[in-house]
Amino acid sequence: MRGLAATVVLVAAVGAACSNGANTSSTVDEEEPTSSSITIPDSTEHGIVSGVVDGDTVQVMIGEEPKVIDLAGIRAPQGDECYAAEASLAVADVVAGRSVALVGDATDAEGTPLRYLIIDEDVPILVNVELVERGAAVALHGHELAGDFLRVNDAAYASGRGMWGTFVCGHPPQGVAPDRPQLRIEAINIPGAVSPDPASIEIVNASYTEVRISGWTMRDATNASSYTFPGGTVLAAGDTLVVMMSCDGDAWCVDADLWSAGGNTVIIADELGNIVDRRVHVVVTEQ
C-alpha cells in the first residue's frame, strides 16, 4: 500500500451508490468537480485505530503515540443529536482496530488533524466515503474529493440509508405516519455580488394538507448555522415560505448564511431530528 503507486479509486463506490433511487426529492443545483482517486504518498503516516471519539473522529496509535484524527470531508451527528450513537457505532464497525493510512495535511479550527482515512489492506477502503455511503455522515463541500462524496451522499439520501431513513428519530407527537411530510426546499437564491438583496431559501408544502413546522430546524451540513421555526408556524397545502439570510428583524430571517463561499447542503429536520428534505447547492467559481 505504501508509495506513489498506491491509489484508492472511488468510481466503483460512486456507481454502486447511484444505482438505487428510492427517494428522489434530493436536489443538486450544480455539480462540483469530481476527483475519482486519492494517492497514498511515501510520506503518509500509518497507524492502528485504537478508539472512536464520535461519528467523525477517531484515535489512532502512530507508533507509541495516540493521536486524535478528524475525518476530512464529512460531518456525522454528534452529542445529543439524532443518530449520533449509530454514527459512532458505524465508525467502530468499519475501522476499529484496523491498520490505516492517514492522507492529508489540513487541520480544523481547533488544530485537530483532518485526514482521509484509508484502511491499509489489499483491498483499500476510504473510510470517510464509506460512512457517507452508509448514511452515517453528511458529505461536506470544499475539499479535493467533494464531488465524489456529494454524489455518494445523494445516493444514500435517495435510498433512505442511515440518518436519511424515514422517522429514524421517532414519530412526531401527531402520531404514526406512513411517510415524511411533503415539505421541499424549492430553491436557494443567492443574488449577485452587487445586489443589495439578501440571499433566501424557498420552502414549499407539496402535500395536500397543512404541515405544522413549529420547532423544526433548517441548517447547513456542518450544523454550525441553523434556524428554528417558531411556535405556531403552519404551512398550508401548496404554500411557499421564503426565509431570508443574513438579515435582521424580519419575520422569517436567519442572522447568518446557511452556506459557505463554496456552497453547502441545506437540511430541514422535524422537531425530533428526522430529515424531511435537503438540497445541495454548489457555488462554481469561473476560472
Image (cartoon, grey):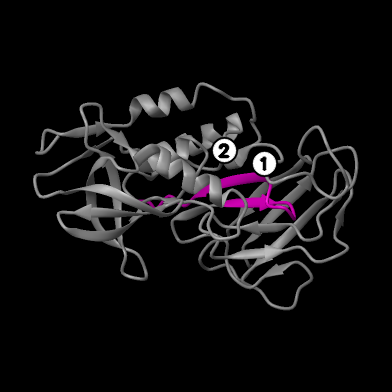
Q: Where is residue 5 in the image (x, y as percent from the top left)?
A: 11, 33
Q: Give the range drawn in magenta.
A: 266-287
**Residue at the spot of label 2:** 162
Position of 107 compared to 198: left or right? left
Residue at 50 percent of width and 46 percent of height = 87
Residue 269 vertical position relative to residue 155 in the rendered view, above or below: below
Q: Is residue 133 magenta?
A: no
Q: What residue type is labelled 1?
A: Val
What is the x, y in percent for residue 183? 76, 44
How many labels, in total?
2
> In the picture provided, is 238 more to the left or to the right than 287?
right
Which residue appears at 15% of the width and 49% of the height? 44
Is residue 279 one of those drawn in magenta? yes
Q: Which residue is farthest bottom?
A: 249
* Front residue of this view, candidates 203 and 139: 139
Q: Residues within 10 Å of mark 1 (few under 14, many from 20)?
A: some
Q: What element carries label 2?
A: helix
Query: Percent x, y for residue 127?
Result: 35, 40
Q: Is residue 277 visible?
A: yes
Which residue is found at the position 78% from the left and 44% from the top? 171
38 relative to 228, above or below: above
| Residue at 60%, 45% in the rendered image | 279
Please name the residue that numbered disc 1 is placed on.
Answer: 168
| Residue 147 visible within the image | no
Q: Distance between the residues labelled 2 and 1?
A: 8 Å
